[in-house]
Image: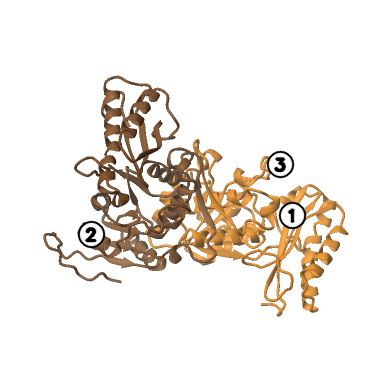
Chain colours: A orange, B brown
Amino acid sequence: MQLEYHCLKGVDFKGHEMEVFRTVAEVQEKCEQIRFSGKSLAFVPTMGFFHQGHLELMKAARKIADKVIISIFVNPTQFGPTEDFETYPRDTEGDLVKAREVGVDIAFVPSVEEIYPEGFQTMVKVQGVTQHLCGLSRPGHFDGVTTVVAKLFNITKPHVAVFGQKDYQQLTVITRMVKDLNFDIKIVGVPTVREPDGLAMSSRNSYLTPQQRKSALCLKKSLDLATEMVSRGKRKADEIKRAVQELILNHPFTKIDYVSVCDPVTLENVDVLRGNTLLALAVRVGKTRLIDNCILSPSGPE
Amino acid sequence: MQLEYHCLKGVDFKGHEMEVFRTVAEVQEKCEQIRFSGKSLAFVPTMGFFHQGHLELMKAARKIADKVIISIFVNPTQFGPTEDFETYPRDTEGDLVKAREVGVDIAFVPSVEEIYPEGFQTMVKVQGVTQHLCGLSRPGHFDGVTTVVAKLFNITKPHVAVFGQKDYQQLTVITRMVKDLNFDIKIVGVPTVREPDGLAMSSRNSYLTPQQRKSALCLKKSLDLATEMVSRGKRKADEIKRAVQELILNHPFTKIDYVSVCDPVTLENVDVLRGNTLLALAVRVGKTRLIDNCILSPSGPE
């Protein structure tokens, strides 16, 4: 299926064409052809409902490789039974227009049945780094992520795959999987894109009421507070966590899922900051679960 | 590492050269080059100690593809704690000579540390078809198999991979994994190779004493008995299983692990034979665990 030409006001379109595929067989053949032709291929897996953060991933991919493929797939197996799979925001047609605008060459938009046909029974499980942070509050989430990403890697056979650093643990888990299963793919992390007031961009921000939207700033504010504490010489993880928790809970509608100060590779808790350390947050604002993170550098910015 | 030229009496050697690699990085690059050159690549994963059964897999691979790669790796994660990992027979130098004789182009012979470096923590798990037959008596065995085979597939990137039908469940599990994870690899099963008296070739046959070796014939004899019963019109799985069990236990040193009459795809038990049905056996002869299988065809041979 070739997406029809859309003429969009004020967009530097340049007549770039994007191919859209719905089936594994077709897109797998296409990607194999690209590899075989000697062109490099970068892959950006997404769940759609694109904001600027997604588009930055695609732009980064554009810079790295000759051809860019994205996938749009809201993966049911990475949602828990009480989570928001059904209500997760979707806008495939709008997404395809945006992707084409930033120069994506191929979009893979499969159905759930195409990815999980009858009889499906295989799981890819990363065991250590999934036992922290979101892995604790979202059991099975990362099994869903690694399984679908392994499938998408085998389908698209990219040289490079691009992920956002906002989902820091996801990036860590995927990096681990790639290393452990010897995927011949380079994983690239792209810095979090933020709204002008600091809120990390997320498809789930669309769930927030105007008042919750204001409260949601507590995540970035608390990262800034922690960064400032470290620059003032604070090194005790407990002290930093207490300050962060207090700041968050001083905002209405908030409930802390976790505040973690941990090793940026193993994700294991750290008591005293020595080298670069991850501060990762998950906070519910109303019913919406938001995450954010930053690297705390006791020796100053990298 | 290039294996030195061996001149073997009576062997049609033709000066065929085989490259031997010890590291993932080197062999992955080599295989990528082969793919990129437009040549087809067939892969035969093995645990070494080659008998004619292994060599037939390599010959089949030779016929299918332009280039043949084998791996020799006794995979510790597919052995249980009380199983024979330490004592599993090994003869890498002899294996390399045999592989080169049948026209193998590349041999990948990694160390355990090369495959499972420090920090390794990922598992590929097929859930349904592993819950029968050997999966019951060897818990975790197939997780070890699927994980290492997924790694080897990503390392060697073959177009085709060749497995023996003697390990019927392994072939089923791998086929399932390839389908579920969208590996772009064709899986080919090669019929079991037998000694002149019918015993299925196995590296573990080397464990048998001369008397046990005689008793071990009960596996093939019981497959033949079942085939004959079906050709005489018997259709009840229980009746066939009872006859098979009786025949096996009439041989000394034998202990039955399982006798299963089941669906050849799902491996679920069958009560009455309708279409092609798998008869699979695992029998201990002394301390040596042997397996064998055949397809029972109520409508006559395929």
Mark 1–mark 2 distance (CA, rounded to whole Å): 59 Å
Mark 3–mark 1 distance (CA, rounded to whole Å): 16 Å
List the residue tagged with mark 1.
A290
Mark 3, residues whose alpha carbon is within 10 Å: few (<14), some, or many (≥20)? few
What x and y, as percent, mark residue B271? 42, 24
Mark 1, residues whose alpha carbon is within 10 Å: few (<14), some, or many (≥20)? many
Image quarter in which the C terminus of chain A is found: bottom right
Is B79 situated above or below A195? above
Dot 3 falls on which chain?
A
Dot 1 falls on which chain?
A
Question: In the rendered structure, which amino acid carries the disc numbered 2?
Answer: Lys
Q: Residue furthest top?
A: B233
Q: Nearer the viewer, mark 3 or mark 2?
A: 2
One can see residue A20 in this view = no
First in sequence, mark 3 or 1: give its number: 3
Helix or strand or loop: what does disc 1 sit on?
strand
Nearer to me, B249 or B233: B249
Q: In which quarter of the view is residue B242 placed?
A: top left
Disc 1 and disc 2 in contact, CB within 8 angstroms: no
- Which numbered marker is on residue A82? 3
List the residue tagged with mark 2.
B98
One can see residue B11 in this view = yes
Mark 2, residues whose alpha carbon is within 10 Å: few (<14), some, or many (≥20)? some
Question: In the rendered structure, which amino acid carries the disc numbered 1?
Answer: Leu
Dot 2 falls on which chain?
B
What x and y, as percent, mark residue B53? 26, 49
- Residue at 34 percent across and 65 percent down: it is B30
The reply to the same-chain question for discs 1 and 2 is no
Q: In which quarter of the view is residue B212 placed?
A: top left
Helix or strand or loop: what does disc 3 sit on?
loop
Nearer to me, B18 or B259: B259
